[in-house]
Image (cartoon, coloured by chain):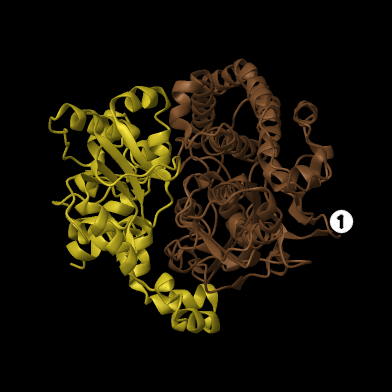
Amino acid sequence: MSQETWKIDVNHVTRVEGHGSIKVNVRDGVVEDVKLCIVEAHRFFESFTRGMLPQEIPWIVGRICGICCVGHQLAATKAVEDALGLKPTPQAVVMRRLLSHSQFIQSHVLHVYFLAVPDFLGAPSVLPLAKTHPEVVRRALRLKKLANDFTEVFGGRTLHPMSNTLIGWRKLPSRKAIQDIRDRLRAALPDLEQTVAIVGTLPMPPYERETEYVSLKRPDGYALYDGLIYSSDTGEYAPVSDYRQVCNEHTVAHSTTKWSRWHRDSYAVGALARVNNSYDQLHPKAKQVAEALGLRVPCYNPYANNLAQVVEIAHCSYESLDLLDQLLAGELVPDDLSFELRAGRGFGAVEVPRGVLFHEYAFDDEGRCCDANAVIPTSQNIANIEADMRAFVPKMLGERDRDDIRLHMEMLLRAYDPCISCSVHLLDVDFVE
Amino acid sequence: MKPKVAFFDFASCEGCQLAVLNCEDQLLDLLERIDLVEFREALSETSARYDIAFVEGSVHREEDAERLRDLRERSTILVAMGGCANTGNVQARANATAPAVHLERIYGAEARDRVLTDTEHWKLWAHTRVRAIEDVVAVDYVLRGCPIVPADFLHLVTRLLMGSKPRVERYPVCVECKEAGNRCVFEQGGTCMGQLTWGGCEAVCVSHGYHCDGCRGLLPEANLGAHRVLLRSTGMSDADIDSRYALFCATQSKAIGSNS
């Protein structure tokens, strides 16, 4: 087979969010071209937000993505607050961290169990697993429901929550709801242990490529809701307002998303980048999970992103228990949400399950939005995914048949957990012959 | 034979498909009763014909319209699922501005000109305008809202599986808002679109301290002219009123008209 000329075209790769294609051309046994094509239609959020009021922005731009709606809402909330010189109350910051944690648990559980585990168990989807591994599917659904209910307690509902706004909370959750979710989260710890056990048995494809890892980072905690921009290449921090220099967005014709590069041609964001960059700041229980999974940092195997996601499920679960106790130790106080419209420009960054997310907004003298920009994790990862494919396909050519290469390309893409509807749309792998 | 059920998405956040996956307690029972043949977000399987196709998202390019026409032909029942599919939702606000202007703002003039003239790839970039599903093909049933209400989905799919007609309540959000015991947003000094908007959401936003922005779409009998007069009386300018209507109802508010 190695002397053949052929192409892989996977159009509309499944089990990723959004539409993308992988194109691999092999000529005379040599990999000639690997392209990751994003074919999603445009939605123009950064343009049509013009004219909106500040408090409308986080509410509307959460609609960029269903899975990351909490993260988009939080990044936008922070950016708009920055533009208007507003400060969230300390109570609101704790509740935003809890909202963010609930989203990480939900998204990582969905990704690990529904999108990645079927590959490793050789199933085309999670559906046949309901017959062959019913306990796995039931546990996945239990954990996912718990995480969704957790989001609902603090957000008002699971998808496109409405409770959080500029400065603080429109309506506070009840004490009883907070207690209930804390008790349920504690009761779910055995399910978490079982998750670690099953993911620990999954074989990892043995492909590694050292790259630059970029994430938020802070010395005093595992940076998810806030932190400065950090690169594993330089070991230095950059302020969030410098994000445009970090992302260096550029356009390529075969994808409707923008691509990023910082110190080299590509960099990686996401769970593995965060664990690599901030391992020391993980909750002690999450470090135990990393050890149990054999995840040692720095780790250069992109397929291990799934392991890093499980480490983060543990981190977010245990830290949430601490934060919920902290919240219950005092009384919740309603926030004064009044503010004055004014001109200004502001920046906000949060980590979302797929990596660091940047939002920027400007407001005119009447306080209406006049400029907006968002840089999404998946668009930052795309150049890196393509670089991984370029590095791995030649190695796979000698070791695997075409169907297996196709599967491993798709698995690689899914390991990054791309969220193509955010970044416009992502990928299809076609072997073109 | 179990009915073949499929989910498709066009331009959207894909949150309505997630809302389906979020029916955790009913999901396994449902999967016993249907043959789920396409759900790209979660599955790799595909099929040639569908008994029920759920379609999320709006149509932005001609190649997407062709894909939609093709799947309409292969589907017995087609359900437009969620705000984007039904009205174009938040992204229909983009229709007020030429696509080339959007592309310039987001990608820059040079990149816009390059991608729009690239012979191999221009179709990818050829945004026309945001269209609801029913603007392209016939729709049999709708699930409203941004996001859809999971109970609506379960009700519809149960009735379709039983071969009976789904229930459709036709009343504004205010009905359920009163039932929920909320104080009227206007009385609290705010503004609200609940009077104009299809109910069925249990007024969840007002119940959580916000107001209604009309994500379930405007009722056919919505009196936008009277509503505009009401909003003006709170001190809102016409520009802000237009912007408010165009948060979730850009296509509808234009079609119904309210500049009286």
Residue name at image x 75 percent, y 30 percent: A293
Which of the 4 image quadrants contains residue A308? top right
User: Element under label 1?
Assistant: loop
- Which residue reaches farthest right? A235
Residue name at image x 16 percent, y 33 percent: B167
Residue under pointer 1: A235
Residue B185, placed above or below residue A322: below
Q: Colour of chain B?
A: yellow
Which of the pair A54/B66 is nearer the observer? B66
Kind of residue at badge 1: Gly
Residue B80, placed above or below residue A195: below
Report whether residue A179 is seen. Answer: yes
Which of the pair A47/A396 is nearer the observer? A396
Q: Chain of mark 1?
A: A
Which of the pair A59/B26 is nearer the observer? B26
Residue A131, placed above or below residue A209: above
**Number of numbered tags placed on the structure image:** 1
Residue A137, given in percent of the width and then of the height, sits at: 50, 24
Report whether residue B61 is seen. Answer: no
Which of the 4 image quadrants contains residue A105? top right
**Mark 1 neighbour density, 10 Å: few (under 14) some (14–19) many (20 or more):** few
Residue name at image x 69 percent, y 58 percent: A394
- Left or right position of B135 against B58: left
Q: Quadrant of the N terminus of chain A?
A: bottom right
- Left or right position of A85 against B222: right
Residue A209, given in percent of the width and then of the height, sits at: 76, 54
Residue B200, given in percent of the width and then of the height, sits at: 26, 36
Residue A355, given in percent of the width and then of the height, sits at: 65, 50
Which of the pair A161/B156 is nearer the observer? B156
- Left or right position of A153 against B21: right
Q: Colour of chain A?
A: brown
